[in-house]
Amino acid sequence: MIYLTYNDQPSGVYSSQVIDTVNFMGESHFCRIRLVAFISMRGFKTNRSKIKAENPGALVLPIIPRAMQSFFSKILFWMICLSRGERSVICRNVLACQLAFFARRAGLAMRICYDGRGAIAAEWNEYEVVPSQKMKKAIYGLEREAVLNSDFRIAVSQQLINHWQTAFEYHGSEHVVIPCTVNSGFRQGLPSENKITAIRQALDYSPDDFVLVYSGSTAGWQSFSTLGLMLKTALSSSPKVKLLFLSGPDPAIAEIKTAFLGQVERKWLKHTEVTDTLLACDAGILFREQSVTNKVAAPTKFAEYLSAGLPVIISEHLGDYSDFVREQKCGQVLDGTDEIKINPVSYAEKERLNKLVFTFFTKQSQKENYLRVVSAINSN
């Protein structure tokens, strides 16, 4: 079996959602699986080394520039499948599916699973992911083909399945929902209260501070402009309310930092350093505007916040997670007019939130769904 990615560069998300998934499926001994990654020639040597450092058996190939890139990649993937006898493939995105569909049309009896990470056509058009109008128009048809012509499907949320039903008239049952999961290095349990206090002190937070953390990018779909007013209201309520951005520089962050001197800080950390910093905080922010992209999403930060014992301050209609917060009482759902509740949680409550991750958002907790994927497409 092949797990195929196309034009996905190594990152923290790639590490946890691709490489860790491939490693888990292989180490669980319910399939033989190999990662095949087509990546940009820009920084190819460095990025290839990053991928192979985490998955030595990965086959990492370059995407050649411009006009012939798609055809060359299709032919190369067809040759890989033919020479290795591979006939089942999980395709991480719409473009990866195109390579698998080509191999099938070229005579290989392929079994294909589309690993749907979101509403791709909506995302490209709502947030200017690509500048080309031609590509924006074409992506709808490619996504429709990926959904309807694959033999099986993975969706990151039930809301994404609902979107496929509405947008592409998908009415099958050959799918599973597997949310974004934490890295397999996750271990249930939190450091002691004393250890967490020490982490807070090292970051210059006092026991009386209430630390809101926003971890992630400030890309368009993060709805930063909408979020700003609520953050300012929370910061105005007390000088003890602190705000930590774990993100890159942004004019909106600079503005709010200037307006609330001593209450707002921004850090850019390696993804391996984020966990300890989250432990020092009191609540995680996951607020996004009401777009199709966001309504079907499964942000990786949700499980990361819970794993650090943080209740999640989340917007309405964010994938399956807004309802999850209500059902599991693990945060606050905001409709855009609510104020953020400044309610410190006990250590016992933090432990309960951490356990939710073990129950719902580890790869082991999703093992039966992975087994169903393998059963559906493994031709051996």
Image: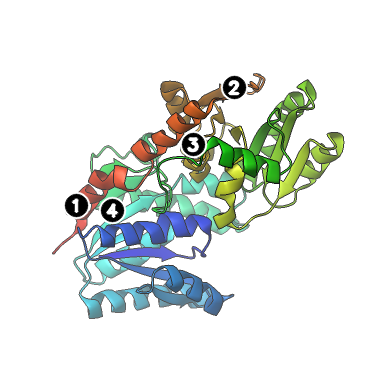
Depicted 293 relative to depicted 315: above or below: below
In terms of sequence position, does the residue under pointer 1 or pointer 3 come before the other? 3
Whether residue 286 can be seen here? no
Residue linked to disc 1: 376
User: Would you call the spot at circle 2 few (<14 residues within 10 Å), some (14-19), or many (20 or more)?
Assistant: some
Query: Is residue 106 left or right of 272 when viewed as pictured?
Result: left
Q: Report whether 347 appears left or right of 96.
A: right
Which marked residue is nearer to the observer: mark 2 or mark 3? 3
Separation of disc 1 and disc 3 at Cα?
32 Å
Q: Which residue is mark 3?
A: 306
- Quarter occupied by residue 256: top right
Tell which circle, 2 or 3, labels the residue nearer the N-terminal end.
3
State the separation of the CA atoms marked 4 and 3.
Answer: 33 Å
Q: Which residue is mark 2?
A: 335
Label 1 with label 4: CB-CB less than 8 Å: no
Disc 4 element: loop
Q: Is residue 7 left or right of residue 254?
A: left
Q: Position of residue 177 (x, y in %)?
A: 33, 41
Report, in whole angstroms, how far the alpha carbon at label 2 lies from the one at label 3: 21 Å
- Residue type at the position of mark 1: Ala
Residue topped by disc 4: 150
